[in-house]
Image (tube, grey):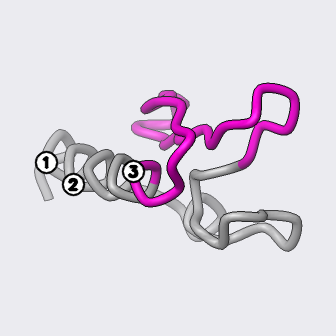
């Protein structure tokens, strides 16, 4: 189960979406999620909308894996 801290958007988050952040040096969005306390990188995207889709898919997979 995810904690409130993991779902909260940090004030310095440029995307406005938890788990998605901008990598300035490489100029792409990085998508990550936590499952059972372990961080998983879901991918690197130039297109923000594809990054959001990946994050949503990761959340669905997380809840499926946790049986909820």
**Would residue 27 appear left or right of 57 to someone viewing this image?**
right
Circle 1 SS class: helix
Circle 3 SS class: helix
User: Where's residue 48, x and y in %?
Assistant: 53, 56
Query: Which is nearer the eye, 54 or 24?
Result: 24
Q: How crowded is mark 1: few (under 14 residues within 10 Å), some or many (20 or more)?
A: few
> Which stretch appears magenta?
22-51
**Would residue 12 appear left or right of 56 to someone viewing this image?**
right
Circle 2 SS class: helix
User: Where's residue 36, x and y in %?
Assistant: 42, 37
The residue tagged 2 is: 60
The residue tagged 1 is: 64
* Residue at x 49%, y 41% (from the top left corner): 34
Rendered view: 59 above or below 16: above
Give the foreground label among 1 and 2.
2
Q: Quadrant of the N terminus?
A: bottom left
Q: Distance between the residues labelled 1 and 2?
A: 6 Å
Locate residue 59: give its quadrant: bottom left
Magenta highlight: main SS? strand
The image's mark for residue 6 is none
The image's mark for residue 50 is 3
Q: In which quarter of the image is the C terminus?
A: bottom left
* Residue at x 85%, y 38% (from the top left corner): 24
**Would residue 62 appear left or right of 52 to someone viewing this image?**
left
Label 3 or label 1, whichever comes before in sequence order: 3
Q: Count of labels shown? A: 3
Query: Which is nearer the eye, 7 or 52?
Result: 52
Q: How crowded is mark 2: few (under 14 residues within 10 Å), some or many (20 or more)?
A: few
The reply to whether callout 1 and callout 2 are in contact (CB within 8 Å) is: yes
User: Where's residue 6, x and y in %?
Assistant: 60, 58
* Residue at x 77%, y 64% (from the top left corner): 14
């Amino acid at each position: 189960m995810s904690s409130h801290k993991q779902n909260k958007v940090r004030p310095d988050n440029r995307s406005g979406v938890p788990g998605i952040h901008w990598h300035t040096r490489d100029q792409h969005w990085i998508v990550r999620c936590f499952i059972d306390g372990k961080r998983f990188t879901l991918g690197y995207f130039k297109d923000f909308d594809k990054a959001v889709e990946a994050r949503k898919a990761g959340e669905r997979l997380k809840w499926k894996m946790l049986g909820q």
